[in-house]
Amino acid sequence: MIYLMRHADAVSDEVDPERPLSARGRDQVSRVCLVLSKTPGFAPAEVWHSPLARSLETAELLLQGLGITSTLVLREGLTPDDDPGPVAADLVAETRDIAVVGHEPHLGVLASMIVHGPKSRGVLFPFSKAGLLALSRSSEGWTAQWIIRAP
């Protein structure tokens, strides 16, 4: 499985240029953890995150909230304006379950490329803040299995 998650709500640039999660964002991750704790099978080998504070914090809170010990991996190519092609190719080649915590519009295009192929550049899977999409592989390719939309 591939799990794609958008970072949770962050404070504005004016409040803190690093843009850590807001209280609302921490609550969003907590709610996602509550849903995932009732969803069997969520155990990614690694959680890839962008270098931005809100992505790392979302990934850390996700692992803490679920009590799982997946490895956190700072992954280049996950910022909002990066080309999702290289990450899509790496994810499709993976044999382990991987979670990715990133940003829009990157994640929406990344999901589209995984499901519809590398030439798909449209955003067919828009992500709400703290939204999580599960993709599974079959003999016919990748399919969206389920989605969590945080409030």
Image (cartoon, helix red, strand yellow):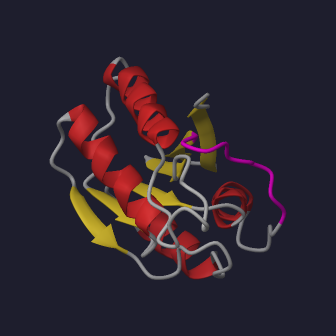
Q: Residue at x 57, y 70 (%)?
A: 88
Q: Residue at x 51, y 36 (%)?
A: 24
Asked if residue 63 lies left or right of residue 127, the reply is left
Pick the front one: 141 or 32: 32
| Image location of residue 123, percent across then percent down | 80, 58
- Horizontal and vertical percent position of residue 2: 46, 51
Residue at 72% in and 58% down: 112
The boundaries of the magenta stretch are 122-131
Quadrant in which the C terminus appears: top right
- Closer-to-camera residue (41/14): 14
**Residue at 65% in and 56% down:** 111
> Does 38 sit left or right of 119 as displayed?
left
Q: Residue furthest right?
A: 122
Left or right of residue 12, residue 99 in this image: left
Q: Image quarter for residue 98? A: bottom left
Residue 99 in the image: x percent, y percent?
A: 40, 53
Helix, strand or loop for the magenta stretch, by majority: loop
Kindly tell me whether residue 97 is visible in this rendering: no
| Image location of residue 55, percent across then percent down | 45, 61
Residue 61 to residue 72: above or below:
above
Q: Is residue 128 magenta?
A: yes
Observer-nearest of 17 and 5? 17
Residue farthest along the top direction in this orientation: 38
Visible residue check, residue 73: yes
